[in-house]
């Protein structure tokens, strides 16, 4: 059993890889547990890391710094891939207002943090970590730590401040949403949403063969279709992409469409042909 202890506790590149992978797997598994209908998801990985650090588990500092930087790069890159296709088109449908609201939240939080820094004995580096944790903004923490290092300042306080306030930031948002739901959402709204939810979500794949929609973009098609649907993916010439409102349909395009079971037959007439793949099974292979 000594070799297991050495793998977990003795600093090495292999030990860092095993510890980070193991803690991530445990966090993802525990994050799927629901309490009162609420689950923390991937955020639970952060809490598992805090517990592991409290128990004395550590990894090599250089490996930790590399994993932190590499993970941050992967995070922002994956986020860009997800939101990039519809980012600019969203400005025409309320995206500008949402971005201004987001910028206002960040600016207000920054002003509060600066004010508290002058009113309390907390240093600016610690306050930066507190701000990042309270807003659950891990990429901002990574950028702040790099800036502090470039200025020759200690960045450990920022990480500690984030670790202390991050759980409160997550739980606080959840509690705030619960309170808002209890205070401002009326029972009639719940009844309306429950009646809407009776339309079961239906996922289907269609091939474009209707000459009437070839060459038109999705915005034009949706405006005249008279049915509710969302085109999630588009297959064209062996490539998969996330379509936007401006995406034009071509002959033979394959579309992964999210709709409801009532509108699915009508969409067959709209697009041209529905494929036989059943995407609504619980054991569906999404990579097929």
Image (cartoon, grey):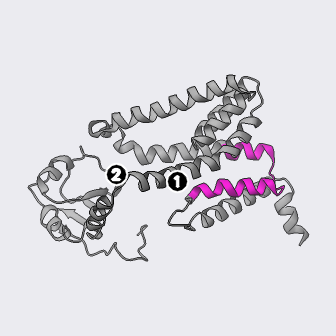
x, y (%) of residue 141? 64, 37
212 is within the stretch colored magenta: no
The answer to whether residue 21 is visible is yes
Residue drawn where x is 16% and y is 71% of the image: 265
Q: How many marks?
A: 2
Foreground: disc 1 or disc 2: 1
Asked whether 153 or 199 is in front, the reply is: 199
Q: Quadrant of residue 126?
A: top right
Residue hosting label 2: 242
Q: Where is 205 relative to 281, above or below?
A: above
Judged from the image, the secondary structure of the residue bearing numbered disc 2 is loop
Residue drawn where x is 15% and y is 47% of the image: 220
x, y (%) of residue 91? 31, 36
Q: Where is 237 relative to 103, above or below?
A: below
Q: Residues within 10 Å of mark 2 (few under 14, many from 20)?
A: some
Residue hosting label 1: 174
Q: What stretch is highlighted in magenta?
A: 42-68
């Amino acid at each position: 059993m000594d070799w297991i202890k050495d793998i977990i506790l003795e600093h090495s590149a292999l030990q860092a890889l095993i510890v980070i992978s193991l803690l991530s797997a445990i966090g993802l598994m525990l994050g799927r547990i629901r309490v009162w209908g609420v689950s923390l998801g991937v955020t639970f990985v952060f809490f598992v890391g805090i517990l592991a650090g409290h128990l004395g588990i550590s990894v090599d500092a250089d490996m930790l710094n590399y994993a932190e930087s590499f993970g941050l790069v992967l995070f922002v890159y994956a986020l860009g891939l997800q939101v990039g296709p519809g980012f600019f088109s969203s400005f025409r449908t309320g995206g500008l207002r949402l971005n201004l609201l987001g910028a206002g939240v960040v600016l207000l939080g920054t002003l509060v943090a600066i004010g508290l820094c002058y009113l309390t004995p907390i240093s600016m580096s610690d306050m930066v970590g507190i701000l990042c944790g309270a807003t659950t903004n891990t990429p901002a923490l990574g950028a702040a730590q790099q800036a502090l290092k470039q200025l020759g300042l200690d960045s450990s306080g920022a990480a500690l401040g984030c670790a202390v306030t991050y759980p409160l930031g997550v739980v606080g948002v959840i509690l705030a949403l619960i309170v808002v739901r209890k205070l401002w959402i009326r029972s009639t709204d719940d009844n309306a949403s429950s009646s809407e939810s009776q339309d079961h979500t239906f996922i289907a794949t269609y091939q474009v063969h209707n000459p009437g929609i070839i060459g038109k973009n999705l915005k034009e098609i949706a405006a005249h279709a008279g049915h509710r649907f969302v085109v999630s993916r588009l297959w064209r010439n062996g490539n998969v992409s996330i379509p936007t409102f401006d995406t034009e349909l071509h002959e033979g395009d394959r579309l992964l469409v999210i709709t409801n079971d009532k509108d699915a037959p009508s969409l067959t007439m709209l697009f041209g042909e529905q494929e036989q793949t059943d995407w609504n099974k619980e054991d569906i292979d999404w990579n097929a």
